Image: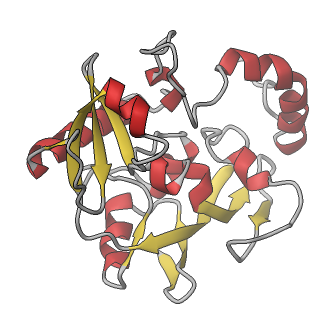
Amino acid sequence: MYQLDAAEQIAVVQAGMLVSDLQDEVSQHGLMLGVMHDPDSSLSIGDLFMQNHINLWQGKFGYLRDQVLGGKWRLADGTTINSGAQVVKSVAGYDLTRMLLGSGHNLAECINLRIRLRPLLKEFFYYRLSIENYLQYSHYDLQPMAAIADGAQHIIICYHHQLHRDYVHELDYAKGEQACLDLLRAFHSLPARKSLDSRPDMPPHINFDWNSWQYPHAEINKANSLHLSSLQRAICPNIGNDKNA
């Protein structure tokens, strides 16, 4: 269900392959998908990337779209197209792949994806620190794989190496991993939920930097609705024609 180029750290994966199965397979080659996964989940690669799930390791590996180089797609009329590039660095022009990813199969059916893999990280550490310290050090001293709210006053951060800082408190591995899995499962139980939904209306601190957060969906839709509608009609001409849908 997948083809692996271990030297280039790239895999071509069928959309129906389970995320956990892919992780198990590529780990034998010292590689991993740069997305935290639930080992007990039956989530497929197609659902992970097409439903715009949250990536809890976004701080290190970026958004889910950053993991995909290209793909093969089936359009509404049954034809298939390829998008993206064969390599990590590309100047191929308009990135059709990024538009299709996260679309919930509304624009095209995903057949396979060309995914960028990462070197396998074998150890993980979890720490708790106050929001004040996180604000003070996050952009200078801390570069966590993930930062997860732990109540109103503290944040849990995930690292792949051990920290030696006097303002962080190391958590028991099982407790830190469970906190991450609980949040991950909460998002995966609601496929339509976006990572932005976890952002409060107001920041917890006047100087809080949202860093990689996007603009509110309403503002994006207002600015791009006309263009998105045109693209939808061009790719899937039958969208909106079924009155019984």
Q: Is residue 37 above or below residue 191?
A: below
Q: Residue 9: percent from the left, percent from the top?
A: 52, 79
The residue at the point 47 percent across, 46 percent down is 140
Q: Nearer the viewer, residue 219 or 49?
A: 219
Corner quadrant of residue 80: bottom right
- Any part of residue 182 in sight: no
Taking the image as shown, residue 48 lies to the left or right of residue 96, namely: left
Q: Nearer the viewer, residue 76 or 221?
A: 221
The residue at the point 71 percent across, 58 percent down is 73
The residue at the point 50 percent across, 13 percent down is 206
Q: Residue 110: percent from the left, percent from the top?
A: 63, 55
Q: Residue 54: percent from the left, percent from the top?
A: 46, 39
Q: Residue 67: percent from the left, percent from the top?
A: 57, 60
Taking the image as shown, residue 103 lies to the left or right of residue 82, namely: left
Taking the image as shown, residue 108 lies to the left or right of residue 91, namely: left
Outermost residue to the front: 166
Q: Is residue 9 above or below residue 44?
A: below
The residue at the point 53 percent across, 67 percent down is 14
Instruction: Classify the position of the C terminus by image quarter.
Output: top right
Q: Is residue 212 above or below residue 152?
A: below
Image label count: 0
Q: How is the image coloured?
A: secondary structure
Corner quadrant of residue 161: bottom left
- Any part of residue 27 in sight: yes
Outermost residue to the top: 202
Q: Is residue 196 above or below residue 20?
A: above
